[in-house]
Image (cartoon, rainbow, N blue to C red):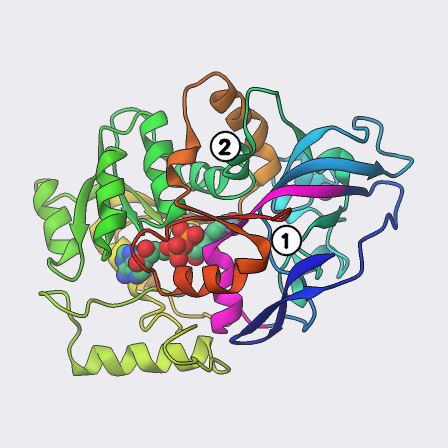
């Protein structure tokens, strides 16, 4: 079968690979009908998340039809349509039962201390072969997979595999509720769903920050007040828009590939640029950009800094943008002295997906407006390149494994 395979930092390919097979009684084999490229995949190719094993199939967002189930999968049968949560979870360990399904003790083959098990990630996360493939082996299928009603399309369900639940989790972590003001950094797909989620949770004002006009335009259509950080200083503007107090809640939907301003009043001075370069060296020592592709963000700590600046005293920050374990810098002194609440993490997908399936099935949200491109799996590499370069219109790429 065909799959998108990570070969090295800056090097991926569509390859022929062996078909997956059932290895444990709780496994299922799913034939993918839709898969997606995510900002998280870019961290692996840019080298800002290290530890990838050559030969790993990429991808952690998928929808498909069950082809085969192990003997202990009692709630699904071949032919069932399902959405695959990006993270696998057993459903019975203590973290799973507390709702921390991304911290499952059993799903990660490296043991309970290894942390989140997810598809298409580095060695420490499994590695589990990913979903940018014609078929995938799903572990703990009985407690991970979520059945889809007929009136939820593949395109809609694909957004429920990772980015919508992650964004919803981010709004939850940031403490969004009725009447709150929220700043969201990043208007990529996760940022767009963070805006939608904050609205669902009753936020009154949503301020979204990015540097790409097409993404800011969609953010505005989704209900946000928008700031281009290359034109204006987001800290000064957010303070002004909130009478000097700052926002109640902040969601970081950017992560380690953050960039600093390249124009306007927020552009860093020489000392700040030097600090940014040192931090890039710390988090992405192996990066080797290729003709302008796979370039790591030039200011890994930028959104962490801005978040602490724009939140009110006693406010709350939810970090869902991914930071690698190599990142050890945080403005802890400023956060401590403002009595902030910080919450963060990998999305507990399995906890949120059933509720979001219901919201989509009942017509409350149509998540497909965030999908901007549909490509066959064999065109995945050019799609990755366009998405990596944030070419206008390349917001969220759906890959169709059968084409
Ligand atoms: N926690 C989780 O479980 C989880 C799950 C999925 C994705 N993620 C992470 O969420 C983040 C966003 O994912 P995505 O798919 O939307 O990625 P993306 O790369 O498409 O979008 C990131 C956006 O951030 C913008 N940006 C860069 N620097 C910025 C700055 N200083 N201020 C404001 N915006 C800035 C970029 O211009 C871009 O539009 C990634 O880090 C991804 O790894 C986390
Ligand atoms: Zn993702
Ligand atoms: Zn578990």
Of badges 2 and 1, nearer the viewer stands 2
Side of 185 relative to 167 (left or right):
left
Q: Is residue 92 left or right of residue 357?
A: right
Residue appearing at x 15%, y 70% in the figure? 267
Is any atom of residue 337 visible in this view?
no
Q: Where's residue 178, x and y in %?
A: 30, 24
Residue toward you, 243 or 168? 168
Q: Which residues are magenta?
A: 30-50
Query: Helix, strand or loop at disc 2?
Result: helix
The verdict on residue 67 being magenta is no
- In the picture as drawn, the residue positioned furthest to the right comes out as 71
Q: Residue at x 15, y 78 (%)?
A: 269
In terms of secondary structure, where does tag 1 sit? loop
Specify whether residue 35 is painted magenta.
yes
Q: Is residue 255 above or below residue 317?
A: below
Does the beta carbon of the residue at mark 1 sit less than 8 Å from ligand 1? yes
Compare marks 2 and 1 and give the one earlier in the sequence: 1
> In the figure, 208 relative to 73: above or below?
below
Mark seen at residue 156 = 2
The answer to whether 246 appears left or right of 37 in the picture is left
Which of the labelled discs sits on residue 116, or is there none?
A: 1
Residues at marks 2 and 1, CA–CA distance in whole angstroms:
25 Å
């Amino acid at each position: 079968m065909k799959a998108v395979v990570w070969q090295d930092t800056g090097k991926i390919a569509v390859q022929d690979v062996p078909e997956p097979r059932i290895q444990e009684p709780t496994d299922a084999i799913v034939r993918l009908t839709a898969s997606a490229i995510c900002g998280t995949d870019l961290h692996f190719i840019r080298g800002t998340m290290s530890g990838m094993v050559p030969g790993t199939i990429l991808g952690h967002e998928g929808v498909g039809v069950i082809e085969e189930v192990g003997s202990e999968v009692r709630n699904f049968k071949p032919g069932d349509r399902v959405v695959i949560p990006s993270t696998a979870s057993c459903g019975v360990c203590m973290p799973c039962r507390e709702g921390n399904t991304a911290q499952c003790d059993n799903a990660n083959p490296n043991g309970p201390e290894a942390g989140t098990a997810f598809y298409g990630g580095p060695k420490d996360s499994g590695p589990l072969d990913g979903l940018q493939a014609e078929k995938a082996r799903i572990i703990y299928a009985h407690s991970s997979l979520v059945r889809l009603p007929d009136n939820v399309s593949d395109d809609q369900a694909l957004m429920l595999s990772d980015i919508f639940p992650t964004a919803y989790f981010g709004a939850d972590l940031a403490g969004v509720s009725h009447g709150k003001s929220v700043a969201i950094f990043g208007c990529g797909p996760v940022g767009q769903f963070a805006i939608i989620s904050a609205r669902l949770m009753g936020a009154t004002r949503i301020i979204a920050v990015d540097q790409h006009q097409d993404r800011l335009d969609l953010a505005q259509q989704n209900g946000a007040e928008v700031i281009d950080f290359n034109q204006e200083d987001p800290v000064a503007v957010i303070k002004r828009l909130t009478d000097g107090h700052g926002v109640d809640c902040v969601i970081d939907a950017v992560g380690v590939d953050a960039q600093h301003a390249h124009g306007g009043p927020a552009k860093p001075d020489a000392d700040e640029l030097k600090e940014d370069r040192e931090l890039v060296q710390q988090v992405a020592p192996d990066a080797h950009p290729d003709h302008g592709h796979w370039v790591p963000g030039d200011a890994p700590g930028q959104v962490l800094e801005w978040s602490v600046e724009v939140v009110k005293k006693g406010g709350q920050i939810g970090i869902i943008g991914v930071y690698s374990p190599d990142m050890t810098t945080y403005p802890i002194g400023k956060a401590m002295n403002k009595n902030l609440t910080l919450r963060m993490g990998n999305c507990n997908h399995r906890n949120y997906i059933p509720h979001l399936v219901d919201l989509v099935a009942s017509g409350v949200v149509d998540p497909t407006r965030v999908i901007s491109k549909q490509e066959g799996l064999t065109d995945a590499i050019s799609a990755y390149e366009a998405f990596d370069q944030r070419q206008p219109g390349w917001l969220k790429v759906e890959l169709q494994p059968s084409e």
